[in-house]
Image: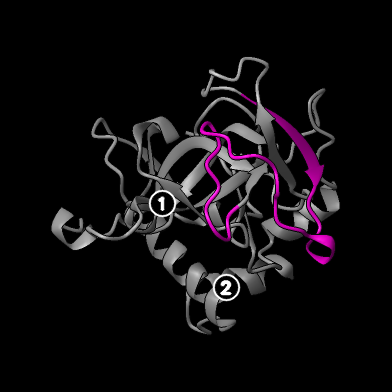
Amino acid sequence: MPSYPEDSLQHYVDSWWESDGSKTLEKGRLIRGFVHHVDEQPRRLIPIGRAEDATEHSRALVQVEVFRKSTYKKTSGLPVAAFPLREGEEYFVFRGKVNRPMLILAAPGEGVPDELRRGAARYQTAPTLLVAPYYGVDRSGKRGGWSPAFVDRIRHIEYPQYMWDALPTPGAEESILRLDHVLAVGRSPEAYDITPHRLTEKARGILDEWLCWIFTGKLDDGGPISYLRTELRA
């Protein structure tokens, strides 16, 4: 497990990460999977016709263009079996990290019986996991890194949307959990890999308090985050 500097919240918790063999999907579990870049301008994939062989329905000719809400016009290309378009839908293309670390923020919800899901599109009732992604802050040949002064302020609990950490997996020495990038991940085993690492019970309690902070804008004056925030910022 990583060791933590004295000017970090994790240093003052008995243990922050733990390993177990169950790999259960639970709050505080570390997983890895695809996360698209949130701030990237989306690109629309437009089916414009079938491939050269008119009998080939599994391939199509497409074009990709930057999507702008202000100039958006519905796709008017020929129907393509490989890319069915329903009313109000479009295809979008995103860049992203294929194997980004993510933290499960809530236990998976209760399963819904199939008879209650009939009549609705499968994606509308498909089970998901609520997660937040980690971003490595170290400078390397593949990334520019984060400003050290900014990282110091994050580690000293200045912002509710950023939580500093050091993950118990190979990769960046320091990482930032982006709680303003919370997203849903499909429950298909193809969507993610489960690691044997999870937050300890005490760490999960602090995570609950932190989530309350970002969602309500209020921080418990008598809680550990508020106390350590005052000490570390001093």
225 or 132: which is nearer to us? 132
User: Picture coordinates of residue 94 (x, y %)?
Assistant: 68, 40
Is residue 154 shown in magenta?
Answer: no
Q: Which mark is residue 14?
A: 1
Query: Which residue shows up at 38% across the image and 64% down it?
Result: 205
Q: Assign a secondary structure to mark 2.
A: helix
Q: What is the quadrant of the C terminus in the image?
A: bottom right
Q: Quadrant of residue 18?
A: top left
User: Picture coordinates of residue 141 (x, y %)?
Assistant: 82, 22
Q: Is residue 175 visible?
A: no
User: Picture coordinates of residue 103 (x, y %)?
Assistant: 47, 48
Decide if residue 139 is on the left or right side of residue 191.
right
Q: Which mark is residue 214?
A: 2
Q: Assign a secondary structure to mark 1.
A: loop
Q: Quadrant of residue 228?
A: bottom right
Give the extent of the magenta segment. Answer: 60-89
Callout 1 crowding tier (Cα within 10 Å): few <14, some 14–19, many ≥20: few
Is residue 84 shown in magenta?
Answer: yes
Q: Is residue 205 visible?
A: yes
Q: CA distance from mark 2 to mark 1?
A: 24 Å
Amino acid of disc 1: Asp
The mark lying in front, picked from 2 and 1, is 2
Up-down: is 72 above or below 138? below
Amino acid of disc 2: Ile
